[in-house]
Image (cartoon, rainbow, N blue to C red):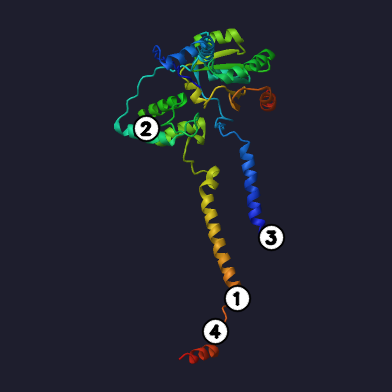
């Protein structure tokens, strides 16, 4: 939702083809300037980022903090974890998580803090709960079902197939005797 | 008969995909529905009374609308909020989310103020406690301070009439 102001200053070199191109653009400067102003006016208001004091963590807490972030989903950019996301909400949530870890809260407590507010959706790895039994067990049930089906199918087809014909012993011996 | 089972599986899958196509993956269901509104303690925009807490919400249903002057969806819903505010059907509490007062004042002067009261959540902490992940978000809170419903994105007449009005009627 935020736009970083992007102002490019173009170098002007007299006589080069680049400057001719620039002059061409300059003829339309009022239009460009007008559009730019409109854009700036439209997006001049931005989210306020308050400066917050840094939170110091000891080595153990830092390790917990670092291991937690990749497991938590950013609600704004849903395919990014809190570790990666540039969204302002992700920065706020990182700060909250850091604060909780500094207070000595455990991994479970931090996760509970987030799921109490945003639901299980913030966890990349879903919990094993009645709502997710199908998710966790489903694939194994399907695999087992498939195996049972394969075994039954194999048995049925082998039972149904006709037995190979008995070799005609007399004919075989006859063939053998004919050979020198 | 040989194809009956695969056909059924295929039809079930098509049905699931069809339903899935019409669902918004960005919509995160709130775990707060049916629970007490999270506590907050925020200053008002006018600084009077000095702080407002969740307890002050109780007594009558209220729509708690997280918004900001920098948010496009809030501009979109603003005319309808004005209409709602004028109709007096329900109290409107605005929580100005991560917004500068110097930005909000001209915005309100220009477009009008639909809210009975505006609180300022400059750091966005109340937003986090309420599970806000993108303004505008609107919560329906009943007279006892429980959250009944949450609308993510601009509030529209359709949503109000279909989802919110029946809740308000049942609550009063």
- Comparing labels 4 and 3, the label whose residue is closer to the camera: 4
Alpha carbon distance from label 4 to label 2: 76 Å
Q: Which residue is nearer to you in this view: B44 or A90?
A: A90
Query: Where is residue A118 shown, x and y percent of the image?
Result: 51, 31
**Residue to which mark 1 is pinned:** A162
| Marking on residue A167 | 4
Local SS, label 1: loop
Depth check, front residue: A20 or A150: A20
Depth check, mark 1 against mark 4: the one in front is: 4
The image quadrant that residue B14 belongs to is top right
Same chain letter for marks 1 and 3:
no
Q: Secondary structure at mark 3?
A: loop
Chain identity of mark 3: B
Q: Are marks 4 and 3 in contact (CB under 8 Å)?
A: no
Mark 2 touches mark 1? (CB < 8 Å): no
Q: Nearer the viewer, mark 3 or mark 2?
A: 3
Identity of the residue drawn at 47% across and 22% down: B125
User: Residue B161: x, y in percent?
Assistant: 70, 24
In front of the other: B33 or A57 = A57
The percent coordinates of residue A134 (x first, y second) are 55, 47
How far apart are the alpha carbons under marks 1 and 3? 24 Å
Discs 4 and 3 carry the same chain letter = no
Looking at the image, tell me whether mark 2 or mark 1 is earlier in sequence order. Answer: 2
Q: Quadrant of residue B145?
A: top right
Q: Is residue A150 visible?
A: yes
Q: What residue occupies the far left of the structure in this picture?
A: A59
Position of the C terminus of chain A, as image quadrant, is: bottom left
State the residue position of label 2.
Answer: A65
The reply to the same-chain question for discs 3 and 2 is no
């Amino acid at each position: 939702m935020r736009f970083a102001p992007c102002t490019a200053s173009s170098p002007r070199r007299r006589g080069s083809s680049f400057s001719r191109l620039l002059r061409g653009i300059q003829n339309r400067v009022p239009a460009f300037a007008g559009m730019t102003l409109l854009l700036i006016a439209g997006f001049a208001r931005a989210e306020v980022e308050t400066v917050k004091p840094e939170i110091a963590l000891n080595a153990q807490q830092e390790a917990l903090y670092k291991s937690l972030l990749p497991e938590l989903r950013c609600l704004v950019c849903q395919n990014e974890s809190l570790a990666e996301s540039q969204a302002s909400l992700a920065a706020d949530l990182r700060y909250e998580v850091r604060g909780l870890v500094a207070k000595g809260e455990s991994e479970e407590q931090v996760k509970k803090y987030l799921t109490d507010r945003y639901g299980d959706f913030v966890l990349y790895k879903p919990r094993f709960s009645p709502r997710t039994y199908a998710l966790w067990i489903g694939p194994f049930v399907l695999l087992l079902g498939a195996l049972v089906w394969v075994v039954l199918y194999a048995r049925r087809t082998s039972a149904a197939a006709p037995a190979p014909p008995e070799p005609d012993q007399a004919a075989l011996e006859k063939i053998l005797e004919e050979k020198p | 008969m040989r194809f009956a089972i695969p056909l059924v599986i295929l039809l079930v899958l098509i049905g699931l995909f069809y339903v899935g196509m019409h669902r918004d993956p960005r919509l995160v269901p709130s775990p707060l529905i049916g629970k007490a509104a999270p506590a907050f303690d925020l200053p008002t925009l006018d600084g009077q009374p000095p702080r407002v807490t969740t307890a002050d919400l109780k007594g009558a249903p209220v729509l708690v609308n997280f918004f900001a002057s920098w948010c496009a969806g809030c501009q979109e819903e603003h005319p309808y909020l004005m209409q709602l505010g004028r109709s007096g059907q329900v109290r409107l509490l605005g929580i100005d989310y991560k917004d500068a007062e110097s930005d909000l004042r001209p915005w309100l002067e220009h477009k009008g103020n639909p809210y009975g009261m505006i609180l300022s959540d400059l750091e966005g902490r109340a937003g986090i406690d309420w599970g806000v992940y993108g303004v505008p978000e609107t919560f329906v809170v009943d007279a006892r301070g429980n959250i009944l419903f949450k609308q993510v994105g601009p509030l529209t007449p359709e949503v109000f009439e279909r989802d919110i009005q029946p809740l308000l009627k049942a609550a009063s």
